[in-house]
Amino acid sequence: MEYYLRDVEYIKSVSEAFYSHLQRKKVRQMNDKMQVFFDPEPRNQNINKISENLRFNVSRNNASLELLDLIKESYATEPQKIYELAIKDNKYVGSDTWRFVKTKVKDFCIEDNYRNILVILTDGYIYHKDNHIEQNNQTTYLTPQDIRKFKLNSNKWDERMSSENYGFIPAVDNLEKLEILVLGINPDKKNDFEEDVIRRYWSDWFNNMKVGRYEIKTASLPSNMDKIIKDFIKNQ
């Protein structure tokens, strides 16, 4: 199964969890939001237009069965269009996850008196052509080539990471009000320890930024991931 199609199904599972959450609430209690973010923002205006169609704010003033059905239908169809447009565009510059957390996550993803959940779709690596910051052995990026360069591809990887302080540079602090679900980790099969290294990078990063709650999941078939995604969103 193409990995972008897995992402599409993961997004669908997230939207279904949001839909179920709204169904359980009384109308007078509704004040819920869901949307999609990209970093960097796509230059393709068609992608931007579709992403706008995935921005929903459901309140007691606009809640209706029609709106809930629109949310469900939009998230079932629109994300695949975004991926197909991006593939057709064929101008991959990377995804600047680190910069998004640094400059946008507090403004876009955290509000008082809300339960704030951020779902990150990633293969586990972070790369953007314009973001290559290094501070000692900590970086804003990670690729399979970097893991080999840092000599984290042997059974001594854990000891080396700890003693040499390898990891992501903390982007911000005080993310106690944010829950993060990372989906789609897809380690390079050439290194038996690749997945362990990736997980350590992400978990250390989240711990250093004091993320309130997080889970990091390896890529799997959407049918296997559906319950995991919905349980994370359902449970607190």
Image (cartoon, rainbow, N blue to C red):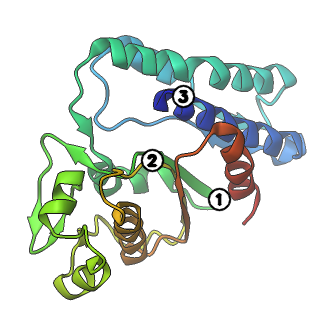
Measuring from the top left, give residue 151's x and y in whole percent.
Answer: 16, 70
Question: What's the amino acid at mark 2?
Answer: Phe
Instruction: Give me the C-alpha separation between circle 1 and circle 3.
Output: 33 Å
Query: Residue 128: horizontal and vertical position, in percent?
Result: 20, 42
Relative to 64, 192 lies left or right: left
- x, y percentage for residue 118? 53, 51
Q: Taking 74 as reference, is 134 above or below it? A: below
Name the mark on residue 17.
none
Residue ID for mark 3: 1
What's the distance in space between the residues labelled 2 and 1, CA to CA? 13 Å
What kind of element bears circle 3?
loop
Kindly identify the residue that appears in the image at 40 percent across and 11 percent down: 46
Residue 159: name its quadrant: bottom left
Discs 1/3, front = 3
Which residue position holds label 2?
108
Q: Please give the residue where the numbered disc 1 appears in the rendered image.
A: 115
